[in-house]
Each structure stands twice: as C-alpha cells, then as structure tokens.
Image: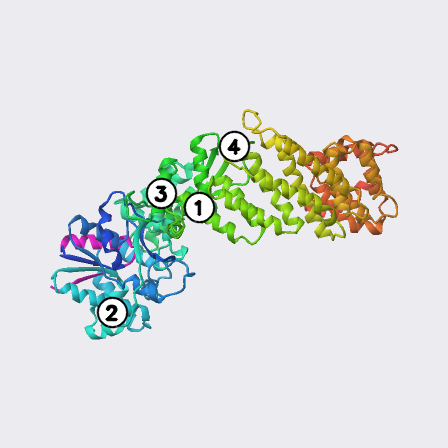
Amino acid sequence: MPERLYGIRHHGPGSARAVLRELERRRPSVLLVEGPPEADDLVGWVADPGLKPPVALLGYAPDDPRRSAFWPFAVFSPEWQAIRWAVRHEVPVRFFDLPYAYRLADDGTADSPPAEGPVRPADPIGELARAAGYDDPERWWEDVVEHRGMPAFAAIAEAMTAIRETSTEDPEDLVREAHMRTVLREVRRTHDDIAVVCGAWHVPALTRKVTAKDDAALLKGRRKAKVAFTWVPWTYGRLASWSGYGAGVRSPGWYHHLFTAGGDVVPRWLVDAAGVLRAEGMPTSSAHIIEATRLAEALAGLRGRPLAGLAEVTEAAEAVMCDGEPLRVELIGRRLIVGERLGGVPDDMPAVPLAKDLAARQRAVRLKPEALERVLELDLRRDIDLARSRLLHRMRAIGVPWGEPETARRGTGTFREQWRLRWLPDFAVRLVEGSMHGTTVAAAATTKVTDAARKAASLGDVTALVEVCLLADLADAFPPVLAALDARAAVDADITHLMAAIPALARALRYGDVRRTDLAGLATVTASLLTRVCAGLPAAVGSLSDEAAQELRDRVDDVHRAVSLLSGDGDSTRDDARDDDGDRSRDGDGDGEDLRERWLSTLAAVSRRPGLHGLLAGRLTRLLLDAGRLDSAEVRRRLRLPLTVGTPPAHGAAWVEGFLSGGGLLLVHDDALLELIDGWLADIPADGFDDVLPLLRRTFGAFATGERRAIGERIAGGAGSATAEPLVLDHDRAALVLPTLGTLLGREIR
C-alpha cells in the first residue's frame, strides 16, 4: 500500500481535525512528521500531562547555545495532534526533515539570532487565495478549510503541484526534500502502511519520481554539528506571524477557539470577548452578546461566507460591544485573537541543570512564569519576598530579564520593591547560554558578575556591579568586584567618574542591612573615593563651560545626597530610610559624620573661589544654607554680588538657577531674599532680558505649582518690595486683548 501524504498548513485547526479523522479511519503502522529527527527521543513526552502546548522543540549547539532554532506546536497544530494520536495508539513516530545538525554546520555565525523552524520565501496559501479572488490568505483558508470541516488533502496537493510548476525552487527546500524521500525509502522496507504529515508545499516533491542516486548526490558531503534538543514552553504571542515566525498565524487565539470550542463557535467567542471587557470594568450584558452574534452571522451571509469568521466577529464586537472604541477592540485582540497562553513542560524533562535549578527556585518562592505581563509588589521584610527579589535580580545578572524593576515605588521605604514580570520563550535559549557559567542560578550569576568586573572598562561599570551584588545577594562575587572597584578607582583621575560612583556605593552601604548583606570593605573604598573627590573638586571647577558646569552641578547634588545618606542626615534619609512603621532602618555613625564634615568643608572652600561659574556658586551656597553652614544674611550678601549693576545678566541668572534649583519654598518665607531677586529682575535691561529668559523660565518653571502661586501672591501683595503698592487692575488696558482672545477662542467676547 503506498504511503498516504497529508499536506497540512502548519498550525491550521482545520488541518488538525482532518488529519485526526484520517488517522482514525485508516490507521497506519508508522507515522512520519516534518521535523528534526534528532528530537525523535522526545516524542514520548507528548503523552505526559505536564507537557502542555503551546510548546516548542529547542535545538541548539551545546558548545555555543546562541546557535539555536525552535519548532513550535500549539494544541491546534496538525503535527501535534498527529503525534499525540500515534503515541496514544502506540504507533511509531519519526521526524523525517533534514537533520538540524546539517543546517547548524552550514549556516550563519554564532552571533546570528535564533531561528524558528524552516522559513520558506514563497507563500503558497497566499497564491491560492489570490487565485480564488481573496486579498486575505487567512480569510480564504478559513472559508475553504477551517469552516467546512472536510478533508481536502487531494485538492490542496493538486493546487500545490500547480504552484510549484511555475515557482522558483528554493535550494534549501530541495535538500530537505531529498532527505525526506531518502527516509521514506528506508521506512518502506519495514512498513507497508505509512502516514506522512508535512507541509502541503512538500507533497508534490515527495510524490515526484526521483532516484535514490540523485537524492544522495544532493546530500553528499554535508557536515554534521553536535546538537542537543529539549522541549520548552512557548506562547501564542510568539506563535503569531507578526512576531517574525515564518510559519506563524496572525490569530492563534482564534484558531485555538476554532479547534476547542466545538459547536456555537461565534456566540462562545463573543461570550469570551464580553468577559475580557467586563474584567476591565466595561459593562457588557448578555443583550450585547446576542446582538453581536446576530450581526456577525448577518455579515457572513451578506459576504457569502459559510460561517462568520474572525473579521465578522471582530466587526460585530467593535460595533455592538465596544461602542466603536479602538482601544477596546485592541484589548480583545491582545487577549483573545492572539492570546496570552504560556505552555508548560514536566519538571523531570531533560534540560540543562541551570533550567532545573531555576524551576526549583520558582517553586520554592511560589513565583510561576507567565506570558501575561503583571505587576509584583514585594515587601523585603518578608522572607519569601526577599527571596523573590534576589531570584529576579540574579536572573537579570545572567541575562534573563524575567522581571523589570519599576523605578517609582508606591511605598515610602526601601523595604518596598515593584516589578513588572513577563516570561518570554527566548529565555529558554538564554538559560542554555547561562548554563555555561554555572549549574545553579546563584553560581551562574556569580560567575557572570565576576567576569564582568574583571573586564569592566570604567569605574562606573564596576560600581553598577556592586549594586548587583547587593540586590542579588552574590556574596561570593562581592570580594572580586570590590577588588576591581578599588583597582579602577586608583587609576581613574576623572573627578566626574569618581563622583558618579559614590551614590551607588552609598546606597549599598546605607541599605545593606535591609537585605541582610555583608558589605565589609565597601565603607573603606567609599571613604577613599570621597577623599579623592574632596581633594580634586577645587581644581575641577575652574573655567567651565555652561554644559560642563551643569554636569558638575548634577554630580555635586548626587554626592551631597549620598553623603547625607551615609550620615543619617538630609531629607532623602528621613523619607527613604524609614520602614512603614516609621522606624529608622539604620542610624548614622561616626564615620558618616566625618565624611559629611569633610564634604561640607570642601563645598565651603570651593564656594568662596573667585571666578566660579554662577550655576555652581549659587548651588553651593544653597547646599551650605540648607546644611546650616550659612545664615540668611550671608546668603543675601552673596546674592547681591552677581545681581549688582554691571554684572552680566546671564551670570546672575545662572547664580539664581543654581541657588533655587532646590525648590522655591525659600522665596515664600524669606521676604528679604524675594525682594532682592524681584528688584534684580525689574532692573534687567530690555536688550539683555531675552538672553536670560530661558534660564529664568527653566528655574521658575521647575517650582511646584503651589510654590509659584504663593510667590506670585506675595509679589502682588507687596511682600517682595518695601515700596510696592497693592496691585490695581487697569480695566481699559485689559480690554485691549479681548479681540485677539476672541479670535483664538472662535467666539465674540464682550
């Protein structure tokens, strides 16, 4: 009996149903499926209830896991259903595509991105759709195959034969098909009843009369690389054709529904759509569902379709259930049409030790990987949340960003963390890559961080690794990272680099006890860096451009906050170093006070230097005022100098910007200071005002709305000047703007 060839569409639910019916009707003695033969030993896992589609076969080079490829399967994939049927009925299964070892030996470099199965340049479904007068291949396939429920293997094979007769052959396809025919010849020697499930494109090639000698000539001389295979979870989002997968479909969620819903496809789909909208607080009643169902079926009838398809149910949902709102339609598309389903693999699936350790850690902290993005709130005072935080940070350290930390915390203390989690299929490859650095998550992260510290090109790179060690609790990586930090700091003479390193080190020192991390030795390095900054800052402030002055001002602010943090002083400490019960996480110590004294003495000395850029002079004066090192009288004296007649207005504006960048509340409470700045502004010559306006706008625009309002009220009320009079509105002058205002608003104003 000749073999029976079932030409299918990859991930076509209609093809899956038709293949199952044919296998039940004419049970074969062996099943051949298009796929990598190196994965034959993994076929038996399909019967394991822990292997839940969507899943994918992952093939990779053990010595360079970046060279890898995926073969995805969904529950509605014909290959998946055929393999499940064969395993359930104890029918032998073989993958008979060209071995991946051949492709891996021939293709690309180690830097090439992971492939996802064979990608064919021709689009046979599109060709058939165009021939039938359809402009949408998916719509044609739904009408011809998915909605009719009848096997069409002979007709599809005939159509593919016609297309291939006029198409340019792909050399890769010819090699693959030569191997398929070779396997077929081999299987014919031991089996009489063979079933073949492959892409419809290959059916004409498998029935073509080609000699074994010709096929052998095509395959001759090919090298084999060493490969490994395993099952990994997949997602419907990644299966969608827009994700870059060549054999994908635009609507995997819809195809899942077509395969699993049974009868009443349209109303069941719209019920699910209503559930999506209700979950987001949008009122959707049963009446909406009934009317949307009627509309979808009416649209299908008007268009001559055998059943309402995705286009009809989407249009009906948009019109009836979404009130025409595009965002609601997009929500249904993301949740249902594409879907957010993540597959699973059994715990005892053969995998690299790193992946097994990760699975164990995930179970231990009760953190399940999910395809749907979600927000996770952590309280680091709880042991399980602390363990979750460390795991997520370790995963980032090995290059698997399962979670992204949110910069804005909802709580007020350092005990709070917020993460945005989402598991991607690509992480399976990254875990294989990470396994080259260790067999556990902690060991791999330690090795990666240690190697990064050794290769770090700058002080800033090493400083960032210090925080990684703290956040991920990598105690074994901390000594080499600290040694690298000390070495880089010793040779880096750039004052801005040294200043940039201090804030991260201060955070590590200040909050290390929150994470119960041993940070011995870090205080010495931090104190040494600050000493070098204090020694080098006076020389660094001379002859600065406006851009350089702004950068140095920002660095000074960062270091000042860091020093305040270490000494237990400053607003940042009072706000951030408290837990939710109002307790201090740590008290300032003597070393912190010494550092603060050294830093403030340096700022005081630098602030008195002649020729200092106005931005820095004003900022240092403000910092010293807030620290209690200057009184209001001295500040007003210093302010009068750049605001005197004859001083360029730009210099005075820079001084004011630096001084007030900490906020405008000072002007609300200090009448003398407000009067001084108000008088200076009033005396700026008209020809120089345009030059200083951007600086003034940037300065006062940064104030809080309440601060600006309070300052304006005090100026209007005469608080800013001893001779000021209450503001009197000139109605005649105000009326002059009414015609222009009316034109802008499109109405007459009287």
| Residue designated by label 3 | 357
The relative height of residue 561 versus residue 162 in the rendered view (above or below) is above
Determine contact: label 4, label 1, CB under 8 Å: no
| Sequence-earlier tag: 3 or 4 | 3
Q: Check residue 5 for magenta coloring.
A: yes
Along the line of sight, which residue is nearer the eye, 210 or 479? 479
Magenta part of the chain: 1-25
Secondary structure beneath dot 4 equals helix
Q: Position of residue 176 (x, y in %)?
A: 28, 66
| Residue designated by label 1 | 445
| Residue designated by label 4 | 514
What residue sits 48% from the left and 51% below the top?
A: 451
Q: CA distance from mark 2 to mark 3?
A: 41 Å
Q: CA distance from mark 4 to mark 2?
A: 64 Å
Q: Residues within 10 Å of mark 2 (few under 14, many from 20)?
A: many
Determine contact: label 3, label 1, CB under 8 Å: no
| Residue designated by label 2 | 178
Q: Check residue 347 for magenta coloring.
A: no
Task: Check disc 4 and give the amino acid type.
Answer: Val
Q: Position of residue 713 (x, y in %)?
A: 77, 33
Task: Check disc 1 and give the amino acid type.
Answer: Ala
Q: CA distance from mark 3 to mark 1?
A: 13 Å
Residue 132 seen in the figure = no
